[in-house]
Amino acid sequence: MTITTFTAIVSFLVLLSHVLFVLLAVSYLPLDPVRRFNTYLINLLKKYGQLVATVIASVSLVSPLIFSNIYYLMPCNLCWYQRIFMFPIAILLITAQIRGKAIDKVSMYVLAALGTITALFHYVSQRLHSSAPGFFDGVVGCDAIGMSASCSEFYFLEYGYITIPLMALTAFLFIAVAIFFSDKR
């Protein structure tokens, strides 16, 4: 599989999750058919929320390893920080799923919140750097010390807005939402 194909698949999954976020947000509108959809969606997440979070975390565990070890895309410093927050989430969720146990939601929220903040900063600084070169050089110019790729570099830009940091941001948010609605105890 080429990097273009892999990127297209992962980007499509991110786009699909954005559609699901919009549907979840719209489902809170005070309209009767929408309320029924909201009830259905929330019941699904209550029943399968931890499983959904586990699948997303597993994909988020494997994808960066494929990008860096198979396609040789060197991760920047901020990507490493995002991995630091995502990998424990994946390991804890996979372990809980195998054992049939509920996870500690507070731990998941803390890791997801820290990862979300890091990914959001990375995405915003990456996008601002592309529109105003030099603006974030002191903050995200990771390659200045020769230790990693530049945090402001785009390896790809799918659908006009999806980059690697946005993929991580989406995963962190989706995991937090799925865990929030999960009813597994």
Image: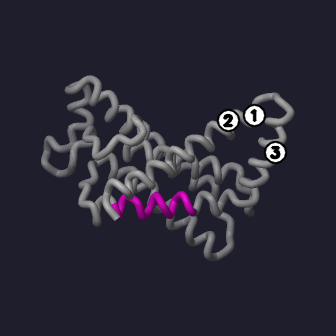
The chosen color scheme is: one colour
Magenta range is 55-66
Residue 19 image offset from top left, x and y in percent? 59, 41
Q: Quadrant of the C terminus?
A: bottom right
Answer yes or no: do the residues labelled 1 and 2 have beta carbons within 8 Å?
yes
- For the point 17% across and 51% down, the residue is 147
* Disc 1 element: loop
Q: Which residue is mark 1?
A: 28
Residue 4 image offset from top left, x and y in percent? 33, 54
- Image-based side of 119 in relation to 146, left or right: right
Q: Which residue is mark 3?
A: 39
Q: What amino acid type is highlighted by mark number 3?
A: Thr
Q: Which residue is mark 2?
A: 25
- For the point 62% across and 44% down, the residue is 20
Q: Nearer the viewer, residue 172 or 161?
A: 161
Which residue is outermost to the right? 32
Q: Earlier in the sequence, mark 3 or mark 1?
A: 1
